Amino acid sequence: MKLKVVIHKEEEGGYWAEVPSIPGCATQGESFEELLTNLYEAVEGCLFTFPSRFIKISP
C-alpha cells in the first residue's frame, strides 16, 4: 500500500508529518529517522483502530 505523506520541518528543530488520506494521522520526531519510525507506527495504529474507515470489504 502506498500513501502520500506530507513532511514538515520545524524551525525549532525536528519534524512532523501527516497522512492526508487518513484523517487525524500525524506524528513527529526529533530526527528524520525518528519521524519515519513514528510514522510507520502511527499509520499502523490508525489503520488497526479504524480499519472499516479505510478498507472496503465486499460482503
Image (tube, rainbow, N blue to C red):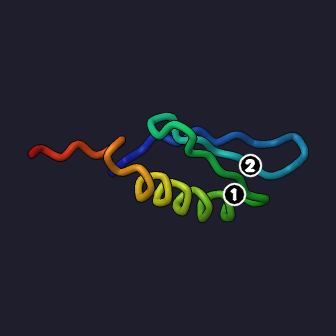
Please give left or right for residue 38 compared with residue 10 in the image. Answer: left
Depth order, front residue of 15/44: 44
Q: Residue at x 51, y 36 (%)?
A: 23
Q: Position of residue 25 (x, y in %)?
A: 56, 45
Task: Find residue 59 and report its horizontal and vertical position in percent.
Answer: 9, 46
Instruction: Judge left or right: residue 18 versus residue 32.
Output: left
- Residue type at tag 1: Phe
| Marks 1 & 2, CB-CB < 8 Å contact | yes
* Left or right relative to 20: residue 3: left
Disc 2, SS: strand
Residue 12 locus on image (x, y percent): 90, 45
Q: Residue 13: image x %, image y %?
A: 86, 50
Q: CA distance from mark 1 to mark 2?
A: 7 Å
Residue at image x 37%, y 47%?
2
Q: Secondary structure at mark 1?
A: helix
Q: Is residue 6 above or below residue 43?
A: above
Q: Tell me if mark 2 has few (under 14), some (14-19) or many (20+) residues whose alpha carbon lies within 10 angstroms of its own.
A: many
Mark drawn on residue 54:
none
Residue depicted at x 47% and y 40%: 22
Crowd class of label 1 (few under 14; some 14 to 19; many from 20; radius 10 Å): some
Foreground residue, 49 or 11?
A: 49
For marks 1 and 2 on the same chain, the one whose residue lies earlier in the sequence: 2
Outermost residue to the right: 12
Q: Is residue 49 above or below residue 22?
A: below
Q: Is residue 39 left or right of residue 43?
A: right
Q: Which residue is mark 1?
A: 32
Q: Quarter-wise, where is residue 8 in the image?
A: top right
Q: Can you identify the residue that label 2 sits on?
A: 15
Looking at this view, is 50 or 26 the one in front?
50
